[in-house]
Amino acid sequence: MSDGYKALIREAQAKGKPALLSFDAVPSEIEGVAFGIDYVDSTGQKSRRWVTARGFKEGLLWAYCWVRRDMRSFSLHRIEAIIDDAGEVRDPASVFPEIIAPRRTINVQTTPKRKRDVDRGAFNARIAERNAEVASERTEAKHRKEPDQRTLLIGRVLLAAIFMIIILFVLL
């Protein structure tokens, strides 16, 4: 394979540490087993990794990654395929069904216990609608500048004074 699989397998075998994955292995027996995975990271980037398993915990495969040369955790639901030393590709759920269980969706449908519960919802909706109207009216009132009583009184006094001046000019 052009992606370095054989070289990595030789390196893994040369160190004498990992055994290569056999598809009849049960999950408890894969610690220290080397195999390949086709993996999709959180950004959607696909890669092929060669790993030596160290264990499973809470939906993660903990393994030494031969590509990154470091311990890594791999989210089990992002592993698209498992590759053995012969290059055989398998679905992860068929290899480790106890660990990688299919995700199930449960649809829950609820009904109100009493008609009052339905009526209460409509009542609450009307209250919310009225509250929104009141808030809108308050906002409009803030933007509308209505003169206060003092300003109105000053205006009336000025108009009266102007009116008296006009009358005095007309009469004189």
Image (cartoon, rainbow, N blue to C red):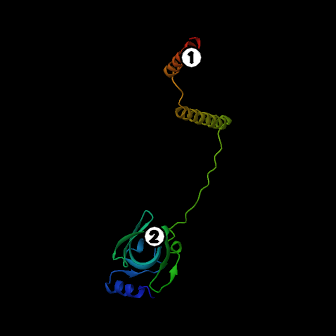
Q: Nearer the viewer, mark 1 or mark 2?
A: 1
- Mark carried by residue 41: 2
Decide: is 172 above or below 138.
Answer: above
Q: Residue at x 43, y 62 (%)?
A: 58
- Mark carried by residue 166: 1
Mark 1 residue crowding within 10 angstroms, few (<14) / some (14–19) / many (20+): few
- Mark carried by residue 91: none
Query: In the current view of this chain or complex, which residue is farthest to the top?
Result: 171
Q: Viewer-proximal residue, 116 or 31? A: 116
* Mark 1 to mark 2 CA distance (whole Å): 88 Å
Mark with earlier residue (1, 2)? 2
Q: Residue at x 36, y 76 (%)?
A: 68
Q: Position of residue 161 (x, y in %)?
A: 52, 16
Assign a secondary structure to mark 1.
Answer: helix
Is residue 115 toward the left or the right of residue 73 in the image? right
Identify the amino acid type marked 2: Asp
Assign a secondary structure to mark 2.
Answer: loop
Identify the amino acid type marked 1: Ile
Asked where in the image residue 48 lies, by quadrant, the reply is bottom left
